Image (cartoon, rainbow, N blue to C red):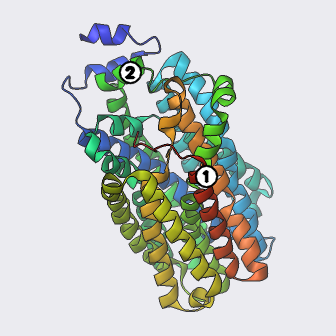
Amino acid sequence: MTMDQVQGSQPSSTALERDARLVSTDHRVAPSEIAIGVVIGRAAEYFDFFVFAIASVVVFPKVFFPFAEPVTATLYSFALFSLAFIARPTGTVIFMAIDSRHGRGVKLTIALFLLGFSTMAVSFLPRYDQIGAWSIYLLAILRIGQGLAQGGAWDGLASLLALNAPAERRGFYTAVAQLGAPLGFMVASVLFAFFMLNLSDADFLDWGWRYPFFCAFTINVVAVFARLRLVATEEFSRLLEQRRLEPSPVIPLIRTQGRVLIVGALIPLASFALFHLVTVFPISWITLFTQRSAGEFLMVQCSGAFICAGAVVASGLIADQIGRRRLLIVSAGLIAIFAICSTIAPLIVEENAIGQTIYVNAGFALLGLSYGQSSGAITSQLERRYRYTGAALTTDLAWLLGAGFAPLIVLFLTARYGLACVGLYLLSGAVTTLLALSLSRSEIRQV
C-alpha cells in the first residue's frame, strides 16, 4: 500500500496526521513501540489527574476553602474533584464528533493541549482571600476542562496494542497499557512530597504547590508527539478501514449496545473503587485525623505505586495463563476479602504507621492485579462498528460510577461513623463486579 493510498483511504485524515505519517517509518510497528506510546500518553494523563487529586487534600482546602473547618473544606474540595468524572462522558461525545470531522490527530492535539492548559492554569489561580468565591468558580471551570479533555484523550491505542500483540501475549500487552496510572502517580507524589518536605508550610501553600501543576503543560506536549507518531502509522489506518477503531454515532450505540455498556461499566467497579481508596482517600485521612506527615506518607504511597506497577505486569502474565475472566473473578474476590478485613479491623490503620503502610502496599498490589485487566473488559462484545466509541464511553461510565465520588462519599462516612466504612464501600464495589461478571458469561477476550 502506497502512502497516497493510505491518505486517500481516510476521509477523516487531516494535514496534521498526513505530516506525522510522512515522518513515520514505513515498517510494521512492533507491539513494543506501540506500548511505549501508550504508556507515555497514559502517564501524562494520570499525572494531571493525580496532581489535582493530591492537591485536593493538601492544598485546596486551605487555599480555596479557608472559611470552612478542615473536614468540610476537604469535602468541598472532593466535590470539585468529582466534576471531571461528570464532564468526561460529555467530552467523549464532543471529541468523537471532532474525530469524525477532522481526524484523530486534531482531536488528540486539542484534547491534550486542553488537558495540559487546564492543569497548568491552576498554578496561576489567586487564593480565596484575594478574589473570594471567584477563585472557586475558576477552579471548578478548570476541573471541568480536565474532564472534557480526558474524554477526548481516548485514542484507541490500547486496542491497537492488543490487536498487534501475539495472541498468546495479549494479556501482557493489555496490562502494559495500564502502567501509565502507577507511573503518573509516582511522578505526582514525588513532586508534592519534595516540596512539602523541603519547604515551610507557608511557602508550600504560597508557591510550592503550584510547581507540579505548572509542569503539566510540558509533559502533555511530549505526550502529543508520542501519540501522534503512532496514530499516523499504516497499522492504525488499516484498523480504521476494518471499522475496529472508528468513531460511531452515540445514540445508535446506546440504543443497540446499552446493556453491554452498562455491564462493561460495572465490571471494573471493584478496581476503580479501590483506585481512590489507596491513593486519594488515605492522604485525606492522614492529613485530617493523624499526626503523620502528609509528605512522608506520599513517599510511602510512591513505594506502593512501584508494587502496583509490578502487579499490573503480573496480571498480564497471569491472564495469558488462566484467562482474563478468571483473573477478574479472582482479583474481585481478593478485593472483597481485603474489604472485609478493613471493615472488621479498622484500628490497624487508625494511628499505626506500620498498619497504614501495610494497608497501602497491600491495596496497591490488589489494585495492580485487578486494574491491569479490568479496563474495557468486555469491549470485544461490542459490535465492531461501535467498538471504538463504546470502549471510550464504557470507561467513562466505569470511572464515574466506581471512582468519581469515592473520596467524597468515603470521607463523609468515615468522618461520622469511622474507618469501617472504607471496607463497606469497597466491598460493595467487589460484589457489584462479581455480579456484573456473572451477567456476562460469554468469554471476555483480550481485545
Q: Residue at x 35, y 39 (%)?
A: 162
**Amino acid, disc 2:** Glu
Question: Tag 1: residue type?
Answer: Ala
Q: Nearer the viewer, residue 136 or 418?
A: 418
Identity of the residue drawn at 22% across and 36% down: 30
Residue 174 spot, x, y in % from top left: 37, 47
Residue designated by label 1: 436
Q: Which mark is residue 313?
A: none
Residue 79 versus residue 350 in the image, above or below: above
**Where residue 260 appears, x then y in whole percent?**
60, 38
Label 1, label 2: how far apart the Cα atoms are? 39 Å
Residue 416 versus residue 106: which sits nearer the camera?
Answer: 416
Residue 315 visible in the displayed image: yes
Q: Give the left or right position of residue 404, taking residue 161 as reference.
A: right
Give the percent coordinates (x, y) of residue 440.
56, 46
**Would residue 112 be visible to someone looking at this image?**
no
Q: Would you say 161 lies left or right of 370 here?
A: left
Give the mark nearer the N terminus: 1 vs 2.
Answer: 2
Element assignment for label 1 = helix
* Mark 1 residue crowding within 10 angstroms, few (<14) / some (14–19) / many (20+): some
Element at label 2:
helix
- Provide residue 108's location: percent of width, then percent of height: 48, 32
In the picture, residue 350 is in which quadrant?
Answer: bottom right
**235 relative to 117, above or below:** above
According to the picture, the residue beneath numbered tag 2 turns out to be: 17
Count up the numbered dots: 2
Residue at 35% x, 11% y: name it.
Answer: 7
> Nearer the observer, disc 1 or disc 2?
1
